Image (tube, grey):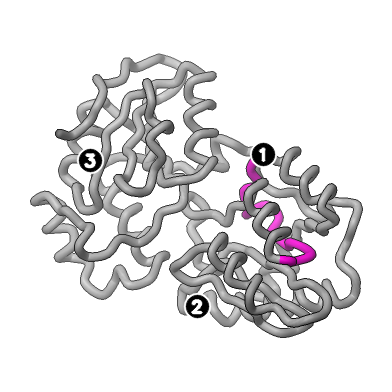
Amino acid sequence: MRRRTPPVQSAPNHPPIALLAGRGDLPHLLVDVFQSQHRPFVVLAFKGQAEEDLVKNVPHLWLSFGEVGTALHYLQENKIQEVVMAGAITRPLMSEIRPDWEGIKWLAKLGAKALGDDNLLKLVIGLVEEHGFRIVGPDDILTELLAPEGALTSLEPDDQGWRDVGRGLEVLSALSPVDVGQAVVIQEDLVIGIEAIEGTDALIERSKHLQRPGLGGVLVKIAKRQQDKRVDLPTIGPETVRKVVAAGLRGIAIEAGRTLLLKREETIRLAQEKGLFLVGLGQVQCRRAL
């Protein structure tokens, strides 16, 4: 049986908002903010993606991929005005897609257009906006999460570290137009791994077994050129740092102003304690590479 909770009650100060949720810390942070603001909200949680505890005691609806009509009806029923997307989502297998009638019609329109992550996200945004809802970015709600520019730890990249960062930017520049990944691992000028459908965490874990003797590699993560900043911004947090340490990497470079830095104090403190450099790359530096 489909699990859902009663419609939210509207409040005058904040328009009702819906969270389309995957897994990870970011959806939990957004729910905390909505509750602290006494803002009316609902969570549309994707089955097999969002965690069970995310929706405990909050208005929610569990969805399979493709249940477009069900989702739209729930948004309209709750008088939702804004929608925010947050959390990691693994692209489903065809066997996992359970479309309703609206979903069948929508999927039929997509065809090959949905092959890339960015194209698919753009189509989802178009669908949501077409029905009168406004898409907002997580950074519009959690502005303090955007990574600042400059060295965030006392340890900064050495010459080889900066060369690896530059090499990473070159690789991501080449990959951006074909909509592949947001992250690479570089070790002494060599491309150790490129993020694909598996996501950043799996890239880091895979890199552990591919590194060569010598200086540890560097994780470089930035937004793609065509990235819509309202959805799927690059994100790191304490768990990223832990995985980087376990993989034997020695530093992380992220894009300032376009990367979400979850649990900032804990993330920076942990990187400092583990002897990693953590640096926010400026917009000019990143855009020049792309």
| Residue drawn at point x = 23 percent, y = 40 percent | 71
The residue that disc 2 covers is 177
In the rendered image, the vertical position of residue 260 relative to residue 250, given as above or below: above
The residue that disc 1 covers is 263
Q: Local crowd at mark 3 within 10 Å, few (<14), some, or many (≥20)?
A: some
Residue farthest toward the bottom in the current orientation of the protein: 190
The residue stretch that appears in magenta? 248-263
Between 11 and 197, the residue placed more toward the observer is 197
In the rendered image, the vertical position of residue 96 relative to residue 35, given as above or below: below
The circle on residue 210 is: none
| Residue drawn at point x = 70 percent, y = 53 percent | 241
Q: Quadrant of residue 90?
A: bottom left
The residue that disc 3 covers is 71
176 sits left or right of 246 in the view: left
| Residue drawn at point x = 44 percent, y = 68 percent | 197
Q: CA distance from mark 2 to mark 1?
A: 31 Å
Q: CA distance from mark 2 to mark 3?
A: 31 Å
On-image quarter of the C terminus: bottom right
